[in-house]
Each structure stands twice: as C-alpha cells, then as structure tokens.
Amino acid sequence: MNADSRAACAVVGVTRVLDGMTRWSGWIVAWMILPMVGSLVYEVIGRYFFNAPTIWAYDMTYMLYGSFFMLGSAYTLLQKAHIRTDLFYDNWSPRVQGCVDLACYLLLFFPALTLFLMVGWDYFWTSFERNERIVTSPWMPIVWPFKGAIPVATALLLLQGISETLKSAYAVVRGEWP
C-alpha cells in the first residue's frame, strides 16, 4: 500500500469515526423529543379535559425545541440537508465540489463557528454562574441548561465540519467522494 492509499484510508477512517459520533448525537437528540411531546400532551389534557393548565409546559416546550433545533444541526450537516444551491452544485465534478466546499469550510464555516463557540460558552457560563432564571415566567425555571446547548451544539457542528472538510479534501485530491 503506497503513501497515497494509506492517507486516503486514514481520511476515510477519521471521517467514519466523526460521522459515527454525529449519528449517535442525532439519535440521542431524536429520542429527547419524547419528553417535549409528553409535556405538550400533558398540558393539552390538563387544560382541556380537567381545566387545570400548567405553568411550566409552555416554557419547557420552547426551551427544549430551541435546544433540539441547535443540537440537530451537526446531524443535518452529515445528511447534507443544510441549504445549498444544488442547481449549480450538482452539475459540478466531485473535484470542483470539493474545492468549493473546502474553501467555504476553511474561510467561512470554521472562523464563524469558532467565534460562535467562544461567545456561546461565555453566554452559557455567565448564566450558569448566576443560576439564571426566566423571570417572565411564573414558574421561573433555570435557563442555563438550555443555554448550554449553544456551545455543545457548536462543538458537535465543528466536529462534523472537520469530517466534511476531510471529505472535501479527499474529493479534491482523488476526484471522487469517499
């Protein structure tokens, strides 16, 4: 096996590991939707059948939904479901697709997400230190666990971005997608 083949195998191996982590996190997030749906069902039954609305269901629902939306972004990237101009992209060769993707990841994706990770961590940490609560709700739930979804989702997205960058580099060099 020559050096080029070994490098290609290493790229494929690393991307498989990173993609596996993303699939795993996507699976966990998908199952975490059940408590959100359960709280909505509980609220509807309590409100409309027993005239006993909750003070927590609305807050829980919007905080969980926002968290799921962010935490699912890495899985969405893995599935190539983010917005792309497929009208042009699909007609390009794998090498050109890889060049465009590689440039976008290196020039736009990583700088923006690195900044977002730093800001998101500070946002979460400040909330955690203050044990921040939502004061507009009579329930006054703590909010830092949901703000914690910001740096976690960003880290997951960065890991999947590394995988996609390696796949793009592979396409540039080999003229095919791994």
Image (cartoon, helix red, strand yellow):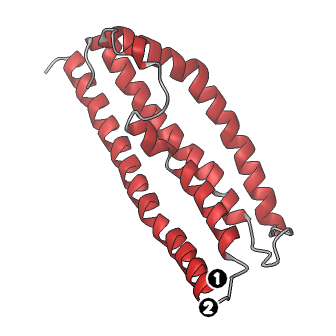
Q: Position of residue 21 (x, y in %)?
A: 38, 49
Q: Quadrant of residue 93?
A: top left
From mark 1 to mark 2, how far is it between C-alphas?
A: 6 Å
Q: Which of the numbered marks, if any, corresponds to residue 50? A: 2
Q: Left of 120 or right of it: where is 174?
A: left
- SS for dot 1: helix
Q: Which of the numbered marks, if any, corresponds to residue 83? A: none
Q: Position of residue 129 (x, y in %)?
A: 81, 65
Residue under the point 59% across and 44% down: 154
Q: How many marks?
A: 2
59 relative to 21, above or below: below
The residue positioned farthest toward the bottom in the image shown:
50
Contact (CB < 8 A) between labels 1 and 2? yes
Callout 1 amino acid:
Arg
Callout 2 amino acid:
Phe
Within-10-Å neighbours for mark 2: few <14, some 14–19, many 20+: few
Residue under the point 70% across and 34% down: 115
Residue under the point 51% across and 75% down: 38
